[in-house]
Image (spheres, grey):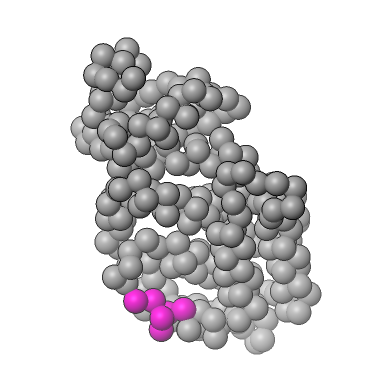
Amino acid sequence: MFGHIFFKKKYLHLDKLIDKRNQILWYEINKNYKVSFKKSLQSEYAAYQQSRKVTFYIDENNLCASSFTHELLHVYLSLNGLHISGGLKNRIMSDEFLNFIFSYNLLEHMSNCLDHAKMLPIYLKLGFEREKFITDFDVFKCTETELNELERYYRVFNKINSNAVDTYIGRLVSIIADPNENFNYDKYLLRLKNIDSKLFLTVYNLFDNWKKVKIENRTILDEDYISVLNVFIDELNAWKRTNTFS
C-alpha cells in the first residue's frame, strides 16, 4: 500500500518523507484531507490547513521524515477536533484588554507550543528522534539578559508594565514546551514565578489542563480544548482584577 510507485503518484519525494514509522499517520491524513505539496521558499517545513484541504510546504534540499511527521501531527490534532490554536486566538482577540496584552506573534507562538506539547509524546512513540522535533532544539529558551530586564521593568511603581507581559509569557511558554531534556530551567522558572506568581500559574495550568485532554475517543464527559480555554480565560481575568497596569 505504501510502496514506491504509490508515493511517486502523489508527490515526487514522498518516498523520502514516509517510512514504516509514520505511514499509518500519513494514511489517516491523506484519507481525510485533500493534500497538496509546495516547495518551501524559507527552507523549512510547514502545513497550511483550510477546511478539509491541507498544503504541506517541503524543504526539498533537506528531505526529512522527522520534519514531515511534525507537520502531519499538527494536522492530526485538527483531524481529531483539537482546534486550540484558533480557539485561543478567537478568545484573546475578542477581549479588548487581552488583545492589547497579547501580540499576534505571541498568540502564534503559544498556539504552536500548545500543539507541540500534545504532539511530542506521539512523535516519540512513533520512534522519531527527540533532537529533530524542532529546528531550534539546541537553543536555550531564556537568557540572563531577558530575565534581568523582566525583573527590572515588569513592575513599575507596583503597576504591571503592559508591554512586558508579552515577553514574560513568551519566555515562560518557550520553557514549558521545550523538548530538550538536557536543559535545566529550574532557576529561570523560579525567577519567572517570583516576578508574577499568579500569571505564572495561569500559564502553567493552561498547559497542564491541555495535556490531559484526550486526542481520540473523547466523550461528552471528557474535557476538551474549549473547557481548557474557558479556565484559562477565567484565570486571566482573575489576574487582571487583582493587578493594576501601566
Magenta span dominant secondary structure = helix
**Residue sitting nearer the eye, 190 or 220:** 220
Q: Nearer the viewer, residue 143 or 66?
A: 66
- At x 37% / y 50%, what residue is drawn? 125
Q: Nearer the viewer, residue 122 or 229?
A: 122
Instruction: Tell me: 135 left or right of 202.
Output: left
The image quadrant of residue 147 is bottom left
Residue 180 is at least partly visible in this image:
yes
Compared to 220, does 41 lie above or below? Answer: above
Determine the residue positioned at 41% across, 81% down: 186
- Tell me, yes or no, if residue 135 can be seen here: no
Residue 230 spot, x, y in % from top left: 74, 58
- Residue 88, how many percent across, how many down? 64, 51
Q: Which residues are magenta?
A: 184-189
Q: Quadrant of the C terminus?
A: bottom right
Is residue 54 covered in magenta?
no
